[in-house]
Every structure is written in C-alpha cells, then in structure tokens.
Image: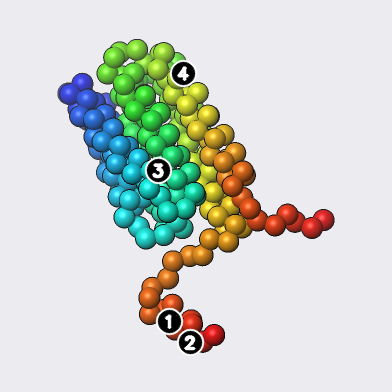
Amino acid sequence: MSSFLLGITIFIAVLTATCLYRVAVGKTIFDRIIAAGLVGTNGFILLTLIGFIFGRIDMFVDLAIAYALLNFVVVIVLGKYFDRGKEKQP
Amino acid sequence: MSVQTIVAIILMSAGGFFLTVSALGLLRLPDFYARTHAVGKSETLGSILILSGLAVYNGWELSTIKILFILIFVLIANPTATHAIARAALRTGLQPWVRKQQQSNEARRK
C-alpha cells in the first residue's frame, strides 16, 4: 500500500506540474486564475497523501484544511478583482 | 490485503483517472468556458474520490473526520469558485469560442 501511495503521489505531482503551463501561458487572465485554482486543489491533495507517506497524518491534515480554505478565498477574491463588468444600477 | 485497503486502492485509482482527465481538459480544450467545464466537474470528482479513498484507508480516527470535512468543503467550494470566475469572465465580455464555419455564417447573417 505504501508503494501505491508513493506512485499516485508522484503521478499527481507530475499532473500538477503540467498544469503550470496554463498558469504561465494562458491566453486570458481568467485561464491563469482557474489553472492556479486547480494547482491549489491538487496541492492540498498532495499534502494529505504526503501525510500518509510520512505517517504524520494528524499534523498534515490540519495544513491541508488551511490550504483548502485559503485556495477558495484566493479564487473568489481574484474573481471579484478582475470582474470589469458594469455596476448594477439600483 | 484487507478489504479496506482494496476499496481504498480502487477509489484512489478512479480519482487519479479523473484528475488526469481534468488536467488534459485544462491543457487541450480550445476556450476558457470549455476549460471551466473540465476544472469544475472532473477536478471536484477526482478530489473527492481520492479523499474518500484516504478516509477509508485511515479507519475510524479523528483525522478521518477532518478528511471528511475537507471533502465536503471541496464539494461545495470548488464549483462555487469556478462559477464565480466564469461569471466574472462573462461580465467582462469574454466571447465564447465557435467553429470557423459557424463564425462565417454569423458574419453573413449580419
């Protein structure tokens, strides 16, 4: 089981590294934001898996919770910031 | 291997497959709105499959409850974030991608 965990961790790490292409190149700013959100989501999954590999899951799962909350807040705030639509008339 | 481990391995393999689909969609699809389709659904399903596999493997502990909390949070938050970005793009005026033929038809109609 530990070799399976190591294998799937390396696999997801490679997937996340390929998604960084869209963060670097993405044609619009929204492509970059959404790719950064995917990298963050994969990041805390990697963090949980690394906790199982090291046998310290009680510590790493708290870090993963913090990453998940921060990732959500960052994507929502960036979406608000780059929204250049017209303000609604009251 | 116990039944618990086998179920965990099956769940996590399915999660890895859906994460692969999501990464491929993000890299290969032609347009921003198509890419939100890949990220919003496949990514959420892959994440919750991998996290539920880890929760099954861990057994009944405090860490399992925390992993289930992350799972429910991802299930709510990830589609919400994708929807917020797509809405911001639509309000900013980003045009959806159409095929070449369709484009010329629309130009002729105008």
Residue drawn at x 24%, y 26% as measured from the top left: A5
Q: Amino acid at mark 3?
A: Val
Q: Amino acid at mark 4?
A: Asp
Looking at the rendered structure, which numbered label has been put on residue B104? Answer: 1
Q: Residues within 10 Å of mark 2 (few under 14, many from 20)?
A: few
Instruction: Write down the chain letter for disc 2.
Output: B
Tag 1's secondary structure? helix
Is there any visible trace of residue B78 in the rendered image? yes
How far apart marks 2 and 4 lie (CA) works out to 58 Å
Q: Residues within 10 Å of mark 1 (few under 14, many from 20)?
A: few
Instruction: Please state the horizontal and vertical placement of residue B72, each as a whole percent of the image.
Output: 49, 34
In the image, are marks 2 and 3 on the same chain?
A: no
State the quadrant of the C terminus of chain B: bottom right
The residue labelled by disc 3 is A23
Residue drawn at x 47%, y 53% as measured from the top left: A28
Q: Residues within 10 Å of mark 3 (few under 14, many from 20)?
A: many
